[in-house]
Amino acid sequence: MDLFQPCWDYVEPRFARAAGIYPFFHQLDASEGPVARHEGRSLVMMGSNNYLGLTHHPAVLAAAKQAVDDYGTGCTGSRFLNGNLHTHVELERELSEFFGYEQTLVFSSGFLANVGVIATLGSHPGAVIFSEAANHASLIDGARLASGEVRIFEDPEDLAAQLAEGDSWEHALVVMDAVFSMTGRVSDLKAYADLKTRYGFRLYVDDAHGIGVFGPNGRGTVYEQGVQDRVDLLFGTFSKSLASLGGFVCGEERVIDYLRHKARSLIFTAGLPPSSAAAALAALRVLRSEGPELIDRLWENARYWKRGLESLGYCTLHSESPIVPAMVGSESLAFRISKDLFDLGVFAIPVPFPVVPCGQSLIRTSVMPTHTREHLDRALDAFKVVKKRYDIPEFDPDNLPVTESEDWSWFMPQDGAPAEPPAE
Ligand SMILES: Cc1ncc(COP(=O)(O)O)c(C=O)c1O
């Protein structure tokens, strides 16, 4: 088979484009945070991870601009060699202080941080990585790159059953998301921390979607659940609440220093650009000074939004965070609804299989403190229109359907003919 054959056979995006409902890679012309512009139209942004709305905070904007003047536009090399800036180190120092860890290591993205740390530690002699089944791709890929054994667990009970096969698991790394990015589900970190106390494994928590949202001053899910002393390595990203790009891992001094010299995704890639590092540092300082007020507004909006969607009849699963899914079921219907929302002035992305189980496609929405009631009401009006327009089934969040295959029926135009014939 020609190496390119799978690319030629990949017809789904072509169907979606031909049906006029391709929902990805929209080219935005401008953004003000809660509102984005597309071809002259303004869209209420319900599809970002800008949980504190800090991408447009004056202090964050000013810091990024100043960094360009101070350092230029890029590091042009690895932090290990020529690309290490005072701002990177200052950022690491303040993150360590804020999260209460000895040291922190900043990577050029969260993805690179997860991959680098897990692949490095998970390749130690005898290492076993236990990875939660619904973990983010970067955690999965880090485990794939590691030479140690990888075991998947579903939940604390399943992990406990697997751990019961041995007495001591100090050679194991248990890796999990604290908040699941598509459904807003929050992990029971306390249960995992209790297992750690019993079995002695190392615990790695990815709190990409919890930092800035949960815990005192936005310190995250591990603080919210009171397990910070038992989380050995805390992962965070700047690409969500901290309004920039880049990722970080906090831990004990010797481990972080080791990773600084061993993590290939730190050493063999260019350092985080100056403007991104400065923006993240400024956002962290805003979180420290204005956190409680921003977080209160975020949660007020999250509650209003979730209640609004539910009162329209949407199933929002058991979301416990500002990420609020609206269950749709069929993949292609999720695409069509996302397109209709877009036309009605709302940016909200469809989440199809395989990101979620087959038949459980959803529209992922999230709020920020900078959404006004008017923004949210405008978005709710659009959700109301599409709810009426399509026969979206009722869902029981505790008993969701799983289908055998994906449903492409909504890619068909009205006459029932395929929008574009699939390639031979
Ligand atoms: C749970 C989780 N971990 C890690 C990442 C990667 O973060 P970044 O955007 O900084 O690469 C993401 C981003 O999508 C995420 O949702």
Image: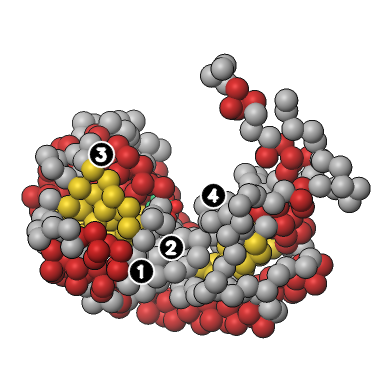
Quadrant for the N terminus in the image: top right
Q: Is residue 309 above or below residue 139?
A: below
Q: Residue furthest top?
A: 2
Amino acid bearing label 1:
Ser
Q: Is residue 375 above or below residue 177?
A: below
Q: Which residue is under mark 3? A: 146
Q: Earlier in the sequence, mark 4 or mark 1?
A: 1
Q: Which residue is under mark 2? A: 180
Mark 2 to mark 3 CA distance (whole Å): 23 Å
Mark 3 to mark 1 CA distance (whole Å): 24 Å
Q: Secondary structure at mark 3?
A: loop
Mark 4 to mark 3 CA distance (whole Å): 23 Å
Q: Nearer the viewer, mark 4 or mark 2?
A: 4
Q: Which residue is under mark 4? A: 354
Quadrant for the C terminus in the image: top right
- The answer as to whether callout 3 falls within 8 Å of ligand 1 is no
Amino acid bearing label 4:
Pro
Q: Which residue is under mark 1? A: 187
Q: Can I make out residue 23 in this image?
A: yes
Q: Earlier in the sequence, mark 2 or mark 1?
A: 2
**Residue under the image location 72 percent in, 36 percent down:** 14
Pointer 2 and pointer 1: residues touching (CB < 8 Å)? yes
Q: Residues within 10 Å of mark 2 (few under 14, many from 20)?
A: many
Amino acid bearing label 3:
Ala
User: Residue 334 appears in which quarter of the rendering?
Assistant: bottom right
Checking the image for residue 383, the label placed there is none
